[in-house]
Amino acid sequence: MKLKQIIDGKTYNTETAEKIGEYWNGLGSNDFGYVYEGIYKTARGNYFLAGQGGCQSKYATNEGNSVYFGKNIEPLYEEEIIPMLERWGETEAIEKHFSHMIEEA
């Protein structure tokens, strides 16, 4: 997924940032419910969620009376990322990037 946005004066670009985890709901990109998301880390250490999805996903865009496939970037704080990566089953990403925030049970 290639996506670039400027938010609050900062550029977020999936092509220049490091992808640290991803989720795909298994549906084809032509399916109305399709969702693909990735968590990225910029060279300056900022995190963001880049996602895209069909017209029945949270990424859908409205234009007039029609709904379309959409894409979006959302800046994230470290505290928001671990629960997302846990849901996605990205244990290695959590251990690699957030070991300072986890502990042995």
Image (cartoon, helix red, strand yellow):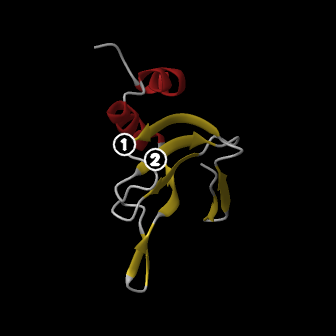
Give the residue type at disc 2.
Tyr
Apparent side of residue 83 relative to residue 98 in the rendered image (left or right)? left
* Alpha carbon distance from label 1 to label 2: 7 Å
Q: Secondary structure at mark 1?
A: loop
Q: For the point 47% across and 46% down, which residue is it? A: 37
Residue 75 percent location from the top left of the image: 52, 53
Front residue of 26 and 16? 26
Check contact, mark 1 vs mark 2: CB within 8 A: yes
Task: Name the residue beneath numbered marker 2.
Answer: 36
Question: Which is nearer the N-term, disc 1 or disc 2?
Answer: 1
Which picture quadrant has residue 23?
A: top left
Give the residue type at disc 1.
Asn
Residue 54 percent location from the top left of the image: 41, 60
Q: For the point 40% across and 34% down, which residue is it? A: 85
Which of the labelled discs sits on residue 45, or is there none?
none
Tag 2: Cα neighbours inside 10 Å, few (<14), some, or many (≥20)?
A: many
Apparent side of residue 14 relative to residue 90 in the rendered image (left or right)? right
Residue farthest to the bottom, as pictured: 64
Residue 36 percent location from the top left of the image: 45, 47
Front residue of 63 and 7? 63
Task: Name the residue beneath numbered marker 1.
Answer: 25
Front residue of 60 and 30? 30
Front residue of 36 and 100? 36
Apparent side of residue 26 relative to residue 10 in the rendered image (left or right)? left
- Which part of the image, by quadrant, shows the C terminus? top left
